[in-house]
Every structure is written in structure tokens, then in C-alpha cells.
Amino acid sequence: MTITAAQIQSASQALRSVLRFDYPADSVLSRYFRDLRELGARDRAFVAEAVYGVLRRLRTLERLCGEDVSTRKLVLAWLARVEGLTLRQLGDGLHGRDTDFFTQVKGREIGELSFAESADLPDWLAERLLASRSEAEVLALAQSLNRPAPLDLRANSLKLDRDALVEKLRADGIACAPGRYSPLAVRLEGKPALQKHPQFLDGSFEVQDEGSQLLGFLLQPKRGEMVVDFCAGAGGKTLLLGALMRNSGRLYAFDVSDKRLSKLKPRMARSGLSNIHPVVIASENDPRVKRLAGKIDRVLVDAPCSGLGTLRRNPDLKWRQSPEALAELTVKQAAILASAARLVKPGGRLVYATCSILPEENEAIVAAFLEANPGFVALSAEEVLGKQGIEIACGEQLRLTPADHDTDGFFAAVLERQG
């Protein structure tokens, strides 16, 4: 790999915008690329890789750069110490002071790091994680979150099964293998462009992390049932639920964002599903929600959360989140769960899930809910999945991490309303 001066310059410019942390890194990069259409595919790939690479290891790289930190130095330090490149591999990318800095940072002793610095986490987040895990566990978790995520697909079981999808992809030269847990998951080697692939265009698969797929199997919707995806977003899990229902019954996709829900409609058209009914709600207490009280067989609450389980894909989140924002989120999570629970009919099932790794967004929310709602009891997530042939040792509540399961970080609790 030979890196050019122009690529280093572009990466440092993009990083400067991202490090303001005004907006998510992916949206900042998208705008940067729109404004610089002359950048080729290889240049864009390098810029994105460099920006995300620096975000993952920001504290370590800042220490290596010393007091005079710049985005250019951060990119060079990432190339030298994380990617392990040599001066020769940088081609014409370095001159003068850049060459001197690269040579110095290549051999620089980093000195003694705090625990949070060694984990490349903000201090407050390291403290929260250490409250429920050992230092060794937190370090292993942080290191796993600092690696890029693999690309997972979900076979649309209405159109073809997982094995058939694997065969078709391999026939097109796409290296892949069945997922470890979800019976619908396919894991790719590398990240090929799939937007124009025939099986994507005809709805035979969707891109979806394998951990996310397991939430659908925890809810386990049946043919002909009334089901609600309470925080549907762009509808990835909604599409899975609709397929598990075999396109029968009635599946409501609720969300407060019309913009997010609008992304579901073209995906529905590709999938062949006709049992999904997207509904924009004003809040968890919308009258349209109240009208369904006690009538729904199964409710999925994939609650708005810190997203810290997705740091492999969104490393900027650990720098953009704060204890204050987290406190607001936990209040919202509790309110949404309480409202969604009112929909569940006797004997019905409620699944509370987040893509967070923090107990205050997960176990604490569920414990408080169960204490306030004695009509609900917890089911064993391990048993629910086991009865569907999905073997995963998780006990009563599902806790997935990239360190242990090579999925995004997820939490889920399965609750049942007593008849």
C-alpha cells in the first residue's frame, strides 16, 4: 500500500471536521465526499479508514503526538503506530517536517497510560464499565470495539434460505460463510459493494448484524399475530419480524421520526412484505398507541440508547456521548418500556433491547420495570433461543459483545405478561 500526499491531506481535512463532534462521523464524511467529488474510490476508502482508525485510538494517538497535536499528526501517528507503515510505503506522501515527525513517532515511547487511555475510552465511560466488569474484561471489550466490524447479511426467508444465499454469493465470487448464531445470518469476508447485486435488488437479503438478528428470534412472532416494533427506525428488525410471521398477521412499525420510517418503504417493496404498517407517532403516549392497549401479541422495544455497543461501526460515539446525555436516555428508556408494555395482551411477550453495553441502560431499566409491573415475568433468553435451535450460553438475559460473540454489543430481556 502506497499512500500519497494528497490522501494524507484529504484525511487530515476530513478528520478536522469530524473532531468537532457536531454531527455523526458518517454524515460528516458523506458531506465531505459530496463536496469533493473529484476524489476517487481509493482516495475515499483511505480517508474513511484513516478517520475511523484515528477515532478508535484517539487517546493513544494524542499521547504519541505530544502537546502539539494536529489532525495531520494524528493521521501520521495512526499510519506509523497502528497500521505499522514504513517511510518507503508512504511514497511521496511525506516531506520535511512530516518525515521527521513520522520517524520520531515510529519509535517514541508512549509512557505510562491511565487505564482509560490504554483502553482508548473517555474517563467517564471507563469508570462506568469498570463498575460491573474487571479491568481485564473492560480492556478486552474495548480492544474488540476498536476493531472494524465484519459485514453480515440476513437472508430473507420469504425468498430463499440461508444456504441458497451462500451458494449464490459464492458463485458470484463473494467469499462468505453461514453465521455462528442466527439461522439467517451470512458473514462476508471483506466488504464488497452490494447495492447493485441482483439478490439485494430483489430483496433476497438485507445487511444486518448477526446480533441484531437474534432480537427477532427472542420475540418469536407467529403467523397471524398482532405485533408491534415500537421503535422501528429504518426498519431492519421490522423486516425480519415480518418474514418470521411469513407475511401474515399485522405488524405495526412505530417511530417518532417520519424521516427514519420513510427509509423502510423501499426496503418493504424489495422484501415482498405486505403485512407491515408504518405509523409515525408523536411520542410513546400517542393516542394511536393507546388504542392498541392490551391487544398485541408481541412487542419489540429496541430502545433509543447510547449506541455504545456499535463502536466498531461508530467509534465517534464514545467521544460524542456524555454522562448527562446518558441520564436523559435512561429516563426516556424507562418511559418507552412502560408505555409499550401496556400494549401487550395477557400471555403476550415483550422484548426490551438496546445496542448498549452499560448496565444502567439495560439490567437496571428491566429490574425497575419488573418491580413496578408484577404482572410481567422474565423468561430465559437462552431457553427461548435454544427451543429454536439457536445455541448460545447467555442465561436469562442476552448480552452480546464483539469480544465474546464477534457481534455488535447488544442487550435483550424477554418478558411475558401473565394471563
Image (spheres, rainbow, N blue to C red):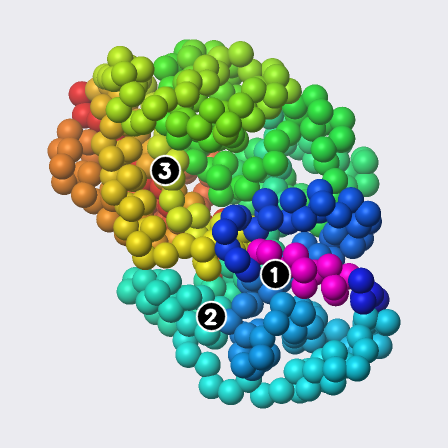
Q: Which residue is under mark 1? A: 16
Callout in the foreground (3, 1): 1
The 10 Å Cα crowd at callout 2, few under 14, some 14 to 19, many 20 or more, is many
Taking 59 as reference, is 416 above or below it?
above
Indicate the position of residue 208 as horizontal and vertical percent values.
56, 37
Indicate the position of residue 80 as horizontal and vertical percent values.
69, 75
Taking 91 as reference, is 371 above or below it?
above
Viewer-nearest residue: 142 or 406: 142
Of the residues under marks 3 and 2, which one precedes in the sequence? Answer: 2
Indicate the position of residue 142 as horizontal and vertical percent values.
47, 64
Taking 204 as reference, is 414 above or below it?
below
Name the mark on residue 119. Answer: 2
Where does the magenta region start and end?
7-18
With 38 as the anchor, is 189 left or right in this view?
A: left
Instruction: Decide if residue 197 is in sight here.
Output: yes
Say which residue appears at 72% left-offset and 33% top-offset: 195
- Give the structural element (helix, strand or loop) at label 1: helix
Say which residue appears at 84% left-offset and 77% top-offset: 88
Q: In whole angstroms, how far apart are the C-alphas of marks 3 and 1? A: 32 Å
Of the residues under marks 3 and 1, which one precedes in the sequence? Answer: 1
Q: In whole angstroms, how far apart are the C-alphas of marks 1 and 2? A: 23 Å
